[in-house]
Image (spheres, coloured by chain):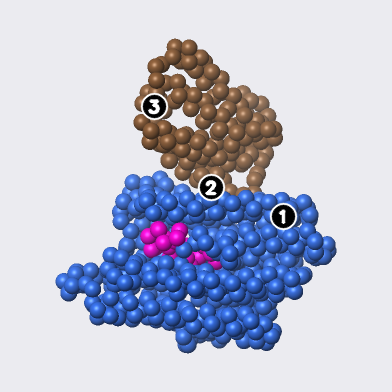
Chain colours: A blue, B brown
Amino acid sequence: MNNIVILPILLPLIVGVVLLLFAKNLKVQRVISGITMFALLGISLYLAHIVYYEGIKTLELGNWPAPFGIVLVADLLSSFMVLLTGIVGIVCLYFGFKTLSEARLKGYFLPFYLFLITGVNGAFLTGDLFNLFVFFEVMLISSYILIVHGGTKYQLRESLKYVIINIVASGLFIVGVAYIYAVTGTLNMADISVKVAELEQQGVLNVIAILFLLVFGMKGALFPLYFWLPKSYFGPPSAIAGLFGGLLTKVGIYCIIRVFTLIFYHDVAFTHHTVIMILAGATMFFGVLGAVSQFDFKRILSFHIISQVGYMIMGLAIFTPLALAGALYHIAHNIFVKSALFLYAGATQKVTGTTDLKKMGGLLKTHPFLGWTFFVAAMAMAGIPPLSGFFSKFALVLSGIQEEQYYIVFVGLFVGILTLFSMMKIFIYAFWGEQKLTDEEAKERKIGSVVVTILPLVALAVIMGLAAEPVFVYLLQVSEQILDPSNYINSVLKE
Amino acid sequence: MKSSLMLHTITRIVAFIILSFSVFLFFAGHNNPGGGFIGGLMTAAGLLLLYVSFDLKTIKRVIPFNYTTMIAIGMLLAIGTGVVSMFFGDAYLTQYFDYFQLPILGETELTTALPFDLGIYLVVVGVALLSILTIAEDDA
């Protein structure tokens, strides 16, 4: 009985509802939501702290005992993800305060922002498969509203596709939940894990495993189901695109990692080393090819989301503690840096009025602060030591070589080069070259105060790189905990 | 649309029956089929009948609620019921019940599930009417 586990879900939900009452008063909304996000970060920090020192925390909602009622479980992985959500949630919110117009903010923007955070935290913390579906829906419905918020023609067209693909995925999710209930007779994830271990994972259980991979792969933008992502993330304003690009795909990845370490871990040669490995390679490769071919700031970044997701899945495919730690490090790195880059795209758009790289140029001369901090984030993305991207790829490549999975290592390294290439392309086109703005325009369009809101993310990318050792010590503990499902099962079922 | 005398007359009677039955369903919900969701839907259906047979403006004068506020209050009520148990040191959403002697009703079971259901009821009525009326106003 630890009510602290539900607070990261409850707090944004209650505050979101309270904000509905202040629909007309934007100032009150801003103040309340600004304070809430900091409180949420504090709670997530505390949760991560006590989970680290005292072990897995569970909460049986309504005091109904474990396999029957709904359980919330905060293990090291969940509390880590909730912490990341708290951090990126604050930065995107304050960036939104600086950049979004009043008209947009007035259309119930902030309540739905908080409901989105509710859904994301719920998906991370729940220990029940059907409840996971419910929190997915909370997250998705809020994301439908945020992605279409503002209602430009482009947004309406692309978000329709986003809604359709997600409804299809949710339908398949329910089918998967129904199948697994039919086979095991339970929906509690720990209990399912026990039952699957007894039944031995073969035949229909492998089919269910692949079905779940398909569902979460759609949400997480895996090959070949990533086609919806680049266009739909191009439409919404950058504060939203940053949050979505950083966070939402990672919820899908989190679910894949959770399901394939807790439940379907018996047939590793087939599920992990074959299916997920091929998907990882293809996702990385085709994602980065898309990025190389584009000449638009936001579109390049959207395609990069896809290729970076491949690295995370690669860690799961190799399936050793070091590889999983590398994957988790990459998730954290990617949430910070990818959100930061999307926000930079927004800041650059504020200055130049476009996201087309060919129409920009010479920003380094007129806006050096924007240019150099972007450079740091872009290099972190590309994986230049000592920044954060280097260490995740290092761990992944090292564990790949240890496990003699040379193909995936080769793909990973090759994709790394192309990533560097497309990041340099942005930098060269947008920040070098001829100055496209007149001197007066450049002086008028000051962006410093907006860039300051992004800096925490860039700083975290630098700190994660410089303090890679302690971060990896922590993440190795996380991955050892999730690689031994008995930890999770014992703390939920209390056997 | 031309107003129809027959529709008006029947609506006046039927709306009352629907609304009172929805209240019955709401209270039945604890141990029998019914509850906040079904009761709320039926109330929304009854109110919607009024909106259809009379026109938007007339009914808006009769029912001057802001449905967004109604949704918010309903949700606060439902969430708040869950939070109360946290103050007693129990898990979130733990429910309590006991039997009381009330003046007219005699021995009655009072539960914390009731305010929770009332919250659901308000949310369902609010959401159903808000979404339908938004579309209707869009057209006009």
Residue behind mark 3: B56
Callout 1: helix, strand or loop? loop
Callout 2: helix, strand or loop? helix
The part of the chain drawn in magenta is A231-251
Residue positioned 47% across, 78% down in the render: A419
- Name the amino acid type tagged 1: Leu
Residue behind mark 1: A187
Question: Eyeballing the image, is A286 above or below B105?
Answer: below
Question: Eyeballing the image, is A211 above or below B66?
Answer: below
Q: Which mark is residue A376?
A: none
Callout 3: helix, strand or loop? helix
| Viewer-proximal residue among B134 and A9 | B134
Instruction: Give the class, few, some or many, for how many residues have Cα within 10 Å of label 3's Cα (few <14, many ≥20).
Output: some
Query: Where, quadrant-wise, is the N terminus of chain B in this rendering?
Result: top left
Occupied quadrant, residue B26: top right
- Name the amino acid type tagged 3: Leu
- Name the amino acid type tagged 2: Gly
Estimate the x, y position of residue B29 in percent, counting from the top left.
65, 34
Instruction: Give the class, few, some or many, for how many residues have Cα within 10 Å of label 2's Cα (few <14, many ≥20).
Output: some
Question: Eyeballing the image, is A296 above or below A65?
Answer: below
Instruction: Give the class, few, some or many, for how many residues have Cα within 10 Å of label 1's Cα (few <14, many ≥20).
Output: many
Residue behind mark 2: B80
> Label 2 near label 1: C-beta < 8 Å?
no
| Viewer-proximal residue among B82 and A483 | A483
